[in-house]
Amino acid sequence: MDPHAIAMVANAFGEALRLLTSFDAELIGIVGLSLQVSLGALLIAALIGLPFGAALALYEFPGRRSITVLLNALMGLPPVVVGLFVYLVLSRAGPLGFMELLFTPTAMVIAQTILITPIVAALTRQLTEDLWREYGEQLRSLGSGAGRAIPTLLWDGRYALVTVLLAGLGRAMAEVGAVMIVGGNIAGFTRVMTTSIALETSKGNLSLALGLGIVLMLLALLVNAAAHLVRETAARQLG
Amino acid sequence: MSTHNSILPLRLEQVSYAVRGRTLIDAIDATFQAGQRTIILGPNGAGKSLLLRLCHGLLTPTKGRVVWGGPFAKEARMRQAMVFQRPVMLRRSAAANVDYALAIRGFSGKDRKARLAEALRNTGLSELANQPARVLSGGEQQRLALARAWALEPEVLFLDEPTANLDPAASRSVERIIGAIDASGTKIIMTTHDLGQARRLADEILFLHGGRLVERSPAEAFFAKPRTDTADAFMRGELYW
């Protein structure tokens, strides 16, 4: 590696640390919006995905297997395709164009929700199915049907479900394709960590890109460490 | 429990249960009346657990019928309970596990609180009420399973080898609790492969082998001399298949 490049990277690192330690306003704004959008998407995905996943595990009906297969396939939705789809729906000529949501944080929340709801639902389904295998006879014996068992199993799987939700959050925070297309990466309005990393890197502004990269990594680490701790503690205390 | 508002008798009419063409329960006819402690005895694989699940409604017979014959048969679902070989506890406190069962059965208010406290007291678990149920010992968990069932004051209680995984001391305390539940007026229908336990608890014996009801006798007569060779062989520990 030539010394010039090394100096550039070192310089970028230094600048990144300066931005981080000085709580640079632009950087904080970008991180804040990222969290807001992805947590918003996670909230909606959880409200839909948790009960839907559990219901899919507990209710028997024709077509259940096809839906399960489809749901599992949707876990791998490419973000740019989701972005394109939401773009088409929200664009001026699209069916929801009148709402004028394109290039707003709301559009980004919608796109990420579509992206991660299948993840939350599919993992919840798997978890609930395993729990039902263990609890099913006992709960039915007590007189609980599938409907009554849904909140019971979700509550009993609450610590494992934290991991499920974090998988969704991680996916939302890390994706760049969907928010880029429907948000437009407008400075100060729809610019999030991943889109600005992409932009700043292409502009050659490595310091801001690196600073954001470091924050993104730290957040991922923090969130996963917290999840691990929650699970460990739960396993020890609740068996 | 008076008989005029009962769900009993429980009648099995030619009940069979087959899985993939293999008949595991074969045309069993039996009637269960209130009062007597019924022990379903037999070697491993005789179909005892299956028969219990068919009676309790967790399985549906592939042939024949399970009929609750009492005037309150419509309420049968909510007036029976089952204790399993391996207790299944929710990830919450011991007390909350009993309370959950009471909530499902529609108990509320003071009655629910009183039932909860009494069930824990009767099974010696009051001290452990706030412990997470799943970290209790095997014996404690089985007592908790009994408390959970007892709190519901079922008219019929099914028990599937409730002491199979327990040491002798824990088994004895479970047997004592079963005796107390019986004394409180609940009909006991229980499976075991433990002859000693059957002797201690049974008023009548249903001897099962190979999915068939081989013999049904009053306990005293059965243990004096079974009427069938198969049961006799089982008693002497010589039933090999």
Image: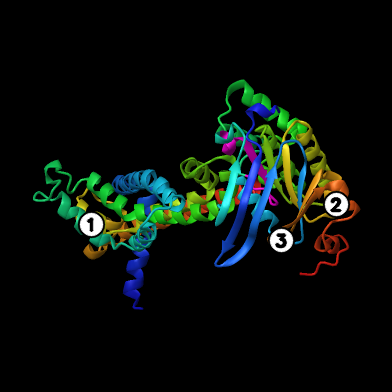
Q: Is residue B121 visible?
A: yes
Please name the amino acid that badge 1 sits on. Gly
Q: Name the element at disc 1.
A: helix
Whole-Å distance between the Cαs marked 3 and 1? Answer: 60 Å
Dot 1 crowding, Cα within 10 Å, few <14, some 14–19, many 20+: many
User: Residue A157 versus residue B216: which sits nearer the camera?
Assistant: B216
- Which comes sooner in the sequence, label 3 or label 2? 3
Residue under label 1, please give it.
A83
Residue B121 at x, y percent in the picture: 76, 30
Residue A232 at x, y percent in the picture: 60, 52
Q: Chain of mark 2?
A: B
Numbered tag placed on residue B46 in the rendering: 3
Q: Is residue B100 above or below residue A15?
A: above
Q: Which residues are magenta?
A: B75-89
Q: Is residue B226 above or below residue A44?
A: below
Picture quadrant of residue B233: bottom right
Residue A235 at x, y percent in the picture: 62, 50
Image-based side of B195 in relation to B208, left or right? right
Asked if the residues shown at circle 1 and circle 2 are in contact, with their CB atoms under 8 angstroms apart, the answer is no
Residue B47 at x, y percent in the picture: 68, 58
Numbered tag placed on residue B222 in the rendering: 2
Q: Name the element at disc 2.
A: helix
Q: Chain of mark 1?
A: A
Picture quadrant of residue B184: top right
Asked if the residues shown at circle 3 and circle 2 are in contact, with their CB atoms under 8 angstroms apart, the answer is no
Q: Is residue B169 visible?
A: no
Q: Residue furthest left?
A: A93
Please name the amino acid that badge 2 sits on. Phe
Let me know if marks 3 and 1 both belong to one chain.
no
